[in-house]
Amino acid sequence: MIELVLASGNPGKLVELEELLAGLPLRLRSMRDFGIAEPAETGLSFVENALIKARHAARLSGLPALADDSGLLVDALHGQPGLHTADYAGHKAPAAANIAKLLAALEGVPVQARQARFVAVVVLLRHAEDPLPLIAQGEWRGRILARPRGQDGFGYDPIFEDPALGLSAAEMEPAVKDARSHRGLALAALRSRLLDHLGR
């Protein structure tokens, strides 16, 4: 069993990634287990921020590190909230505040103009100085609803609708969401190469 540190303190993300990596001989541990605080995300792209987080967690835990950086890009808002998705309504803002701010920004925008996409970049480092990180990305296209729907998921899930299913991300069964989500697609791309990468 290979231990990996997840470079995130978000418990919802830990559960989601454990489900997506189920069946692999891996044990995913939160960086909270090691008392590691989250680093400042000073990158100018999702890839840079994921690498910052992974190197930080690997350096302080001594374990291989898995990190992701993800965000919501709304076409009508010129790609916002983008890199600031988690803190859209302020530093460490709760999900409800972020959702409220986004819905206010889209007030009056018709449903056909509310296209959006979740993007995720997932990075695996064998050690803090790994010069050849494994990087994968995924994208989930949908639209922003006028009001929240559903009780599951986290973050912006209640207002992000997958038009093909007619469901918000918060209304989906976990297996359905995993198969369609940005993070699920990124991890599927990474999964087949992950064990080989760790074994080098």
Image (cartoon, rainbow, N blue to C red):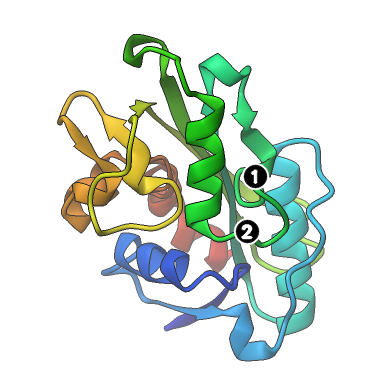
- Where residue 28 sits in the image (x, y, percent)? 47, 77
User: What number is the disc on residue 88?
Assistant: 1
- Amino acid at circle 1: Tyr
Q: Helix or strand or loop: what does disc 2 sit on?
A: loop
Residue 18 picture location, percent across and down: 37, 69
For residue 4, side relative to residue 115 (left or right): right
Label 1 Cα neighbours within 10 Å, binned few <14 / some 14-19 / many ≥20: many
Name the secondary structure under disc 1. Answer: loop
Q: Is residue 193 left or right of residue 71?
A: left
Quadrant including the N terminus: bottom left
- Image height check: is 39 above or below 96? below
Q: Position of residue 113 (x, y in %)?
A: 41, 11
Q: Quadrant of residue 168?
A: top left
Instruction: Check if mark 2's residue and mark 1's residue have beta carbons within 8 Å.
Output: yes
Q: Amino acid at mark 2?
A: Ala
The residue that appears at 72% across and 81% down in the rendered structure is 36
Q: Quadrant of residue 181?
A: top left
Q: Residue at x 66, y 66 (%)?
A: 126
Q: Residue at x 72, y 58 (%)?
A: 91
Residue 28: mark: none
Q: Nearer the viewer, residue 173 or 81?
A: 81
Q: Indicate the position of residue 138 as horizontal and vertical percent values.
A: 45, 36
Residue closer to the observer: 164 or 90: 90
- C-alpha span from label 2 to label 1: 7 Å
Kindly identify which numbered label has been placed on residue 93: 2
Report the front residue among 139 and 116. 116
Label whose residue precedes the other's in the sequence (2 or 1): 1
Q: Is residue 101 above or below residue 20?
A: above
Report the residue at 55% width, 65% height from top. 198
Q: Nearer the viewer, residue 105 or 31?
A: 105
